[in-house]
Image (cartoon, rainbow, N blue to C red):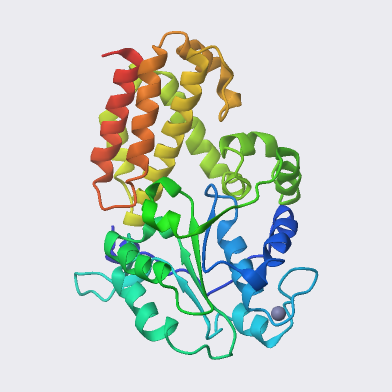
Amino acid sequence: MAAADDADVPAPEFSVAPLLPWQRAPLAAMLAQRAQWHHGTLLHGPAGTGLRRLGLHLAQGLLCRQTAAGLACGQCDACHLFLTGGHPDFRLVKREYAPKKDNTGELRLRDEIVIDQVRELLDGFMYLTSHRQGAKVVMIYLAEEMNTQAANALLKSLEEPPQATYFLLVSHQLRLLKPTIISRCRRLPAPQPPPAEAAAWLAAQGAAAPLLLLAQAGGAPLKALTMKDEAYQDERVRFLNRLAEPRRLSVIGMGAEVDAGARAVRKARLQAWFDLLATWSYDLSACAAGAAPRYHPDFAPQLSKLGATVAPRSILRYHRTVLRERSLLAHPLNPRLVAENALFGYRLAVLGE
Ligand SMILES: [Zn+2]
């Protein structure tokens, strides 16, 4: 594989995606309290439900000069600055691209938000007077991606917040956050759409089987949208068919498969496999207990056939192991080893051998 293929591609310029229909009213309700806004807010909800855009619209609303219909107006100078990514009183802290250690000049996306990024905020941003005599907003996306040093540095500011500075921490996985961080913030659960509304939205985006996609995504509409892709569905069906026949599962062969391609491709494939292992093992334990599958209703016959042969406790234990392993995937690892371990574990849980 050519070296150039192995480089991560830096994300596009700053952009704010439009609010999702079910986010408008809850956001307006949040912004109605902006005069007494808490200095630390923890916006949380599942991945694939539009938290990044919700957080950005909330930040824009806090900085806007004149909200309209309860939301940021989109017209004032603050909104213009915000939408071009140039508002001097706003910072978005997220994982950054950094040069690879091999001196090739190529970039790779860091696995963590590092302490230098928080220091830059503390020294260069937060304690300077607001450029515009208004509030300052720092959005941390995602809060669980801060490493320990970064989180500790931020904690000090959350304890003694500078005046008129709002921290907006966005998180998909609260259980990965330090309890001390959580306790300094006001928790704000992100609004989730009722299934019918999410399905209607998906259909409007061109999804042919919106309810099935929503099931696969655990109800997360943006995640469901990414699963609309035909290549993804082919890969999913192929992978699940293999899990449905554990005796014929070739662990070593699949390990080699996950190892093929550029770094970013390998990582994405491993992530997709773990998502499928997690949802499949959940469904299998449901079927073993006589319930219906939640994520893969189109595989109900295979799931109930296999479910009748497995020990519910053993597959549930396996499911929990997969969830734990999946939460570690962001860190450097050997995709092949991780995949092989997970698949051997699956065979053991299902076949007892
Ligand atoms: Zn505005």
Percent x, y of residue 44: 53, 52
Q: Is residue 8 above or below residue 122?
A: above
Q: Is residue 127 above or below residue 308?
A: below
221 left or right of 181?
right
Task: Say which quadrant the C terminus sits in.
Answer: top left
- Between 336 and 165, the residue placed more toward the observer is 165
125 left or right of 343?
right
Q: Is residue 109 visible?
A: no
Residue at image coords 25%, 48%: 333
Q: Is residue 22 above or below residue 214?
A: below
Residue farthest top in this picture: 309
- Between 222 and 41, the residue placed more toward the observer is 41
Percent x, y of residue 337: 23, 39
- Between 5 and 336, the residue placed more toward the observer is 336
Residue at image coords 27%, 64%: 149
Judged from the image, the quadrant occupied by ligand 1 is: bottom right
- Between 69 and 142, the residue placed more toward the observer is 69
20 left or right of 116?
right
Task: Say which quadrant the N terminus sits in.
Answer: bottom left
